[in-house]
Image (spheres, rainbow, N blue to C red):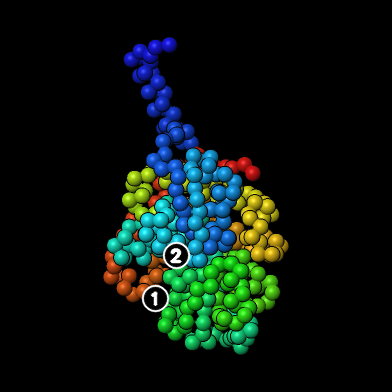
């Protein structure tokens, strides 16, 4: 059958009508199908949507061939993208602000977490007599990696209680079994980490938590507003050059966000690798339950989130106040809005 000019015009009209209907966005050719995502502590509940998107095949459904490179902490994952060995970071939103202050423009395009989900705790072995934050002075505090979001949380906590980062020693202990061992063996006196590490140490009564951002109410009380956390972010140049690929990544994460909320802790525990359980499936499931509220249900950035994050960073980094940060360039909800139109609901 041959197509006349009239046929082509009719087809163009139908195509235009379809593309204007929410949720019926025509498939766009991906600029880049094979890419690497760098993450700091993949097994943490903080990054659960990334693992679910990978394990459930959501990236593949979007036409993507994704490799996940796991590092000891978020700062290390960021270095991989800055250095060019990875394309996208799965990491804390606030890095986008710090990067802009240094003249590097990165942008968050989908959230995995709407609360930091980080807890600061003292060792019941070496700090059994802990009474106030002042007792942390001169102590060794374990974080996933220096410069990571767990380190930033320590800095914010110290500043809030009249202490400086130089008042303590920061030690990188990773985000898994190594962190648990470091605390139990007395290598560190306190720890800033996430689940399942926190729940495992809590269950064995090795720690006492002194600051907890796994719940929205506690997070808002601590920071004075919504505090965005785990996200996918990338150099603005990558997003500009690969908008369809960025959309595909967003679609997969939004779908994972919704799947997690629907599946719950038991469903999640059946899908994640056995190594994530750290030898205790029951405690892992409990840690997921504790963290569900802190995970984003839809990938959308709350409107007050970026300013809350900037305020937190300025609390211990006065130089940011003079950096003239343009927060509008650190995030976008454009991709997540379209992803939610495509996946208003998900099946288990």
Query: In the visual, does 251 lie left or right of 264?
Result: left
Spot occupied by residue 15 in the image (x, y as percentages of width and height): 41, 26
In this rendered view, identify the residue nearer to me: 49 or 55. Answer: 55
Residue mark closest to the camera, 1 vs 2: 2
In this rendered view, identify the residue nearer to me: 195 or 159. Answer: 195
Q: Report helix, strand or loop for mark 1.
A: loop
User: Residue drawn at (39%, 12%), measured in percent from left and top?
Assistant: 2
User: Residue drawn at (61%, 74%), measured in percent from left and top?
Assistant: 181
Mark 1 surroundings within 10 Å by alpha-carbon count, few (fewer than 14), some (14 through 19), many (20 or more): some
Q: Residue under circle 2?
A: 76
- The correct choice, above or below, for 255 with respect to 201 in the image is above
Q: Are marks 1 and 2 in contact (CB under 8 Å)?
A: no
Q: CA distance from mark 1 to mark 2?
A: 21 Å
Mark 2 surroundings within 10 Å by alpha-carbon count, few (fewer than 14), some (14 through 19), many (20 or more): many
Question: Between disc 1 and disc 2, whose residue precedes?
Answer: 2
In this rendered view, identify the residue nearer to me: 228 or 123. Answer: 123
Quarter that holds the N terminus = top left
Mark yes or no: residue 229 visible. no
- The correct choice, above or below, for 236 with respect to 65 in the image is below
Q: Residue under circle 1?
A: 316
Mark yes or no: residue 317 visible. yes
Spot occupied by residue 77 in the image (x, y as percentages of width and height): 45, 61
């Amino acid at each position: 059958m041959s197509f006349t000019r009239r046929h082509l015009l009719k087809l163009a009209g139908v195509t235009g009508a379809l593309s204007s209907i929410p949720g019926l966005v025509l498939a766009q050719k991906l600029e880049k199908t094979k890419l690497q995502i760098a993450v700091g502590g993949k097994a943490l509940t903080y990054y659960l949507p990334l693992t679910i998107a990978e394990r459930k095949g959501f990236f593949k459904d979007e036409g993507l061939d994704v490799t996940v490179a796991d590092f000891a902490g978020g700062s290390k994952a960021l270095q991989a993208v800055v250095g060019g060995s990875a394309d996208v970071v799965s990491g804390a939103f606030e890095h986008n602000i710090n990067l802009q202050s240094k003249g590097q423009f990165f942008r968050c395009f989908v959230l995995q977490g709407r609360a930091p989900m980080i807890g600061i705790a003292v060792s019941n072995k070496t700090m059994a007599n802990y009474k106030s934050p002042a007792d942390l002075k001169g102590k060794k505090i374990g974080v996933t990696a220096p410069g990571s979001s767990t380190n930033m949380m320590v800095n914010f906590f110290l500043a809030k209680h009249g202490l400086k980062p130089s008042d303590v020693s920061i030690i990188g202990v990773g985000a898994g079994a190594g962190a648990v061992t470091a605390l139990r063996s007395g290598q560190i006196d306190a720890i800033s980490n996430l689940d399942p590490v926190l729940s495992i140490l809590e269950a064995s009564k090795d720690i006492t938590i002194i600051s907890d951002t796994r719940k929205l109410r506690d997070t808002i009380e601590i920071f004075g507003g919504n505090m965005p956390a785990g996200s996918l972010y990338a150099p603005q140049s990558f997003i500009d050059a690969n908008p369809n690929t960025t959309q595909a990544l967003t679609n997969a994460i939004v779908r994972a966000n919704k799947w997690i909320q629907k599946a719950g802790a038991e469903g999640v525990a059946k899908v994640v690798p056995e190594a994530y359980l750290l030898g205790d499936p029951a405690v892992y499931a409990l840690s997921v339950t504790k963290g569900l509220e802190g995970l984003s249900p839809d990938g959308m950035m709350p409107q007050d989130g970026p300013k809350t994050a900037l305020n937190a960073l300025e609390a211990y980094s006065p130089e940011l106040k003079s950096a003239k940060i343009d927060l509008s360039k650190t995030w976008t909800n454009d991709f997540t809005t379209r992803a939610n139109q495509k996946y208003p609901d998900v099946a288990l």
